[in-house]
């Protein structure tokens, strides 16, 4: 196996290159009886889609998903769900100039050394475009978790370069191209990004993900702990360089008396342990 | 995971139902640098294709394969190879009559009990049409094994109902619709099948598979033995009810003095142990 | 991984060599709450134990099992169950004579070619003594299946060399050293074996395994079918050369009209499909 | 499987509870031909051992490891390496007081909810004592990596509560109970810890791990990336709340022009991408 599958009971297998004919995925382990159609997946893909604002990559893709199996009369049957996203904007000539060079921070050099061959067009398999498959597979998982368990998983931008962002409300997150949870901060972010882009530079960001209503006991103990699986999933995203759970690195300076998530009849008093 | 992947280093993931939009597969772990195009897969699919003689299912499918990833300039890159076979003959109305019944020897009843839902069209996921994905994935593996190691894997019909067939030559195998290795026996097989069909009945068959030039030491010890993996792969094919290796069940009555594969400077004297 | 684990939800990992310090195993995935002590395992090991009659290997081992984890106050806790069987009869000098030869039908030659090193004492890791770990792990699984689901899994000798044996009753199976289900046939088997041994030869055997009360729908579809897993498990036992399910190879000559397991309000009329 | 195995080609399976009879592990996939004895593992376990200074848990254990398989004449054979560490200090009565309570930050509550049963003695399976198995399995891996590839993996304490520690030299790391790489800072750390302990409190820490001479191309692409596997391994350690690779969270404020690891004929100019 070459790293293209993730998960055990709910297992996602992914294929596709940045400028090949298509991306696709197989979700194996989705329970039967979930109402599912391509629109459920499409609306999540639309949020990820490139070219949606001037702040992101300008590649033009509709990212239209087609479900190929696993559904009968609008419901999942418990069999593998195959789906396909055709690439439309295959401007591989744009990459001709870099076919003989290795870009810093990209996997070009590693692929070259590992396989002795590489698809230089847009990073090939190493392109961040692969995250479309994660979004699609995640859309199915999120729908099941929400309908079956009431679990809601959401994320927002909490820092962009030097700009720290306070969480105000979930409603704002979907109303600006930065997924910023503070409507009043958006104008400043736009100025920051425009200035950065003008200087020909870029920066990093921090994203917070919150899962609500998760039942006690999910995940396996020891090596299969939920936080370990989450850390692997996050770190396997192309440019991710760090993962924190609960209080994260702040727990270094926290005292035990402060850090402990007291368990009371009303529930846990904090989320420091994650 | 729900049983739709097979293998570790060379891992095949499969999806698709008999009367859904398409079948597809993902081969993860094919080494880089193998010359590969859709024709390499197509010619093996054509051998499996239904409707090619009056003795097999009359469903009409071209079984045209499209490779979606993993190839750059005619060679594998080491990344996942996704491929697709669209269903063309989706006559699901033919199956309306059986939507409320369970056919003996089929998985309908099991799926119904396990998932509480089933796709009744042609067996859905349980249709033997899924073997097209195995043929396609096998075509890639066979090409690699042949080019890299000189390993040749071939099969032939060795028994059809009561008709036992002697092995004459590999050339005959591809020249008749039965994959019979004895050209002189084909006429008799045709008469046997026509009579059987006329009586509205069917029968079983035995297939022999031979792998030549396999290097010593392939497979893992204990639970991952090559013969265990082969047995699982064969038995997971829909109607397979038995698997033998080497002398197989004949070894019950063989004496140890007869069964032992003597190891000599000229190699093993027999293949009883498989 | 080198083939020393088997199973997914109920996963067995095994270690040990024929003449090393000990054999041991880890059962990962046994549900919590099962009453379990070492005697539950020991009684199954005693049935497998060498040296129990003149017809089997004369190695002397008590095969005493020690449970090392996974139990609290007499019940499983859901964590991994580690257990140990110390080797007592480590007469490795007996094998000095064969340190430079390869025995037919054994894995010596394969290990040598694969690893470039081998433990020549009694077959090392390839010794059939490893099946003690399967028996121990199986004892735990059988206890769970019986108490939780009423599933009973039993086996008996159905053929020994040329001697075919009729099934009479389960009671007889445990009352003779051959696990023969026909008390009246035991004397003949003893004569057959004594004559065979006198001639310095050996023979094969056939074993029938019957699982009763198995709920519909166990196992996964496609590659993870229950019959595929069973075939792999059986074939991974050292000298096993063939596996049949249901009617097995008899289905080759069966007509479809005869083979089909008719599904009636009273259940299946036969077990040809397994 | 219940989360007690980690890794694919080099797979570690672990068992044992804090106050059960023993901890043990199985390393499956260690290549043949590595010189290995129990002392190679023991010296790493001695570094982890509790009770070695007044700053750590006072539990008394010699943590003596016994190798049970996989070695022949002082070398690994390629088969599974089983090993055992008996618990000596089983003072389970110390924990009687907490049998009915759940400690904050521990897994007691989660186990109770998940399994409906738990071993309350010292956290049972969830005890950090399980890391002894990781140390043992890691000792074998480290020896192979060093001898075969020249890869050296080492770690040191870089922050203790509010005390940030500069890296001075590797030699100091092994000469104080804090694994502090700055000999001149040790006195201050001791005062800090003594004061903290006197106040009945505790704090967090940061550890830096450095792997040198790692060849290009290790790990699998996409979901199986080396940084993802490392993140999962680290986060699965009991109290770990965050993982960073390369520049880590500092990359949020780094500009692209600063963050990029330029690839030059002399190698990479920085390690920001990890």
Image: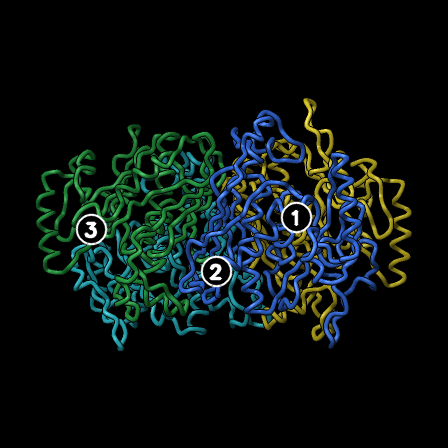
Chain colours: A cyan, B yellow, C blue, D green
Which disc number belongs to residue D183?
none
**Residue on which disc 1 sits:** B231
On screen, residue A144 versus residue D153, left or right, reads: right
Image depth: mark 3 or mark 2 in front = 2
**Residue on which disc 3 sits:** D56
Image depth: mark 3 or mark 1 in front = 3
**Residue on which disc 2 sits:** C37
Tags 3 and 1 on a common chain: no
Regarding mark 3 in the picture, which secondary structure is present there?
loop
Residue at image location 38% in from the left, 34% down from the top: D37
* Residue sitting farthest toward the top: B265
Image depth: mark 1 or mark 2 in front = 2
Q: CA distance from mark 3 to mark 2?
A: 35 Å
Q: Position of residue A270 (x, y in %)?
A: 23, 68
Q: Position of residue A61 (x, y in %)?
A: 44, 56
Badge 1 crowding class, 10 Å Cα cut-off, few under 14, some 14 to 19, many 20 or more, is many
Nearer the observer, D244 or D49? D49
Q: Chain of mark 3?
A: D
Q: Are marks 3 and 1 in contact (CB under 8 Å)?
A: no
Q: Position of residue C31 (x, y in %)?
A: 48, 64
């Amino acid at each position: 196996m070459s790293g293209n599958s993730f998960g055990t009971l709910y297992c996602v297998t992914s294929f596709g290159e940045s400028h090949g004919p298509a991306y696709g995925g197989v979700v194996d382990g989705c329970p039967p009886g979930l109402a599912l159609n391509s629109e459920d997946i499409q609306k999540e893909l639309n949020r990820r889609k490139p070219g949606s604002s001037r702040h992101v990559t300008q590649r033009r893709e509709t990212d239209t998903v087609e479900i190929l199996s696993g559904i009968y009369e609008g419901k999942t049957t418990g069999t593998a769900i195959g789906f396909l996203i055709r690439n439309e904007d295959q401007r591989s000539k744009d990459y001709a100039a870099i076919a003989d060079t290795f870009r810093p921070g990209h996997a070009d050099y590693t692929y070259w050394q590992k396989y002795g061959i590489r698809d230089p067009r847009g990073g090939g398999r190493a392109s961040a475009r692969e995250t479309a498959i994660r979004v699609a597979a995640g859309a199915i998982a999120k729908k099941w978790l929400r309908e079956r368990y009431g679990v809601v998983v959401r994320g927002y931008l909490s820092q962009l370069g030097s700009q720290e962002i306070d969480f105000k409300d979930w409603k704002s997150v979907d109303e600006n191209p930065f997924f910023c949870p503070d409507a009043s901060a958006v104008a400043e972010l736009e100025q920051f990004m425009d200035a950065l882009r003008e200087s020909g530079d870029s920066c990093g960001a921090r994203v917070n993900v919150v899962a609500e209503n998760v039942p006690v006991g999910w995940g396996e103990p020891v090596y299969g702990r939920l936080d370990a699986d989450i850390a692997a999933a996050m770190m396997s995203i192309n440019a991710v360089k760090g993962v924190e759970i609960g209080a994260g690195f702040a727990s270094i300076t926290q005292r035990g008396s402060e850090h402990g998530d007291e368990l009371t009849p009303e529930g846990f008093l904090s989320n420091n342990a994650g």
